[in-house]
Amino acid sequence: HAKGKPGGPKRMVAINTNLGIMAEHFFPGQVGKDYTLSPYLETLAAHKKQFSVFSGVSHPGVTGGHSAEVSYLTAAPHPGAASFRNSISLDQYAAQHIGERTRLSTLSLNVSKKGNQSLSFTNSGVMLPAENNPASVFKALFVAGNEGEIERKVHDLRVGRSILDTVAQRASALQKKLGQADKERIEQYFTSVREVERRLQIEEEWEHKPKPQVTVSSPKDSEYLLEKIAAMYDLIRLALETDSTRLVTLLIKLDGFSAHIPGVS
């Protein structure tokens, strides 16, 4: 943006696929702005001046093949080790600074056949579940409930905070009877509880604000990999355009999907 003028909102979208890429077809052979686009980057030729390609970047100590997926946004070392403990992911760190400005502090998405694994981790290294169903994401972002539904949702959020209070009180009483190592683990637990409570409070505040209106219909889930990825990409675009969130992660796990494209034999 022009010098002296405020810029637009800062956004981040992080995407990881579990099978990786063929590096020789992705990274350009030259440095500088006049590089020749690689085969993978040719599809982005019209946007060449709007993106940068980084190579030779890696997290020190992050080993273990596919197990390194959990360290993609955390850089926590040795994810395959039995003693591994993850740390906060980049999107959650950013959410601590800008997450309150949007309906969703972060949007964690997942394209997979099993589970709700994500790229997002809390301060204490706990994985935050990702949303796997495009229709559910669309509803959360753009479908407004009636007054009764909103009040029920607010009630559920308050119940959740009340339960957290009760659990925290019991854990606090237990902490007095523990040794130093166990006290440190309890403190990590308290950090997680406080973080969840803060999220619930913010979510309650947003429940009373109108959701943005869009002219497209809700996407459908699909058994086909390319259709499901396309639906998630469309949702990411809508979420950013409506400023519903500014921080998105998408984990794509290709295992188990149909290899066929509908309509193509």
Image (spheres, grey):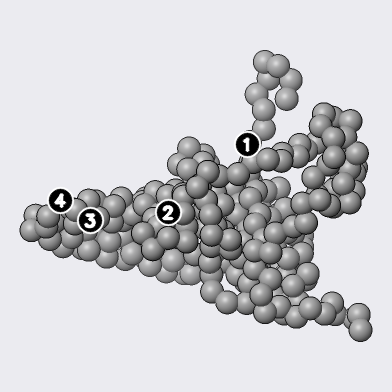
Kind of residue indicated by mark 1: Lys
Residue furthest to the left in view is: 177
Residue at the disc numbered 4: 180
Q: Is residue 2 above or below residue 182?
A: above
* Local secondary structure at mark 4: helix
* Local secondary structure at mark 2: loop
Say which label, 1 or 4, has the lower sequence index: 1
- Kindly report the distance in space between the C-alpha atoms of the residues bearing marks 3 and 2: 16 Å
- Kindly report the distance in space between the C-alpha atoms of the residues bearing marks 1 and 4: 41 Å
Q: Are marks 4 and 2 in contact (CB under 8 Å)?
A: no
Residue at the disc numbered 3: 186
Kind of residue indicated by mark 2: Asn
Which one is in front, 183 or 247? 183
- Kindly report the distance in space between the C-alpha atoms of the residues bearing marks 2 and 1: 26 Å
Hey, which quadrant is residue 31 in on the image?
Answer: top right
x and y percent of residue 91 in the render?
Answer: 53, 47
Rendered residue at 54%/74% (across/down): 115
Residue at the disc numbered 1: 10
Q: Are marks 1 and 3 in contact (CB under 8 Å)?
A: no
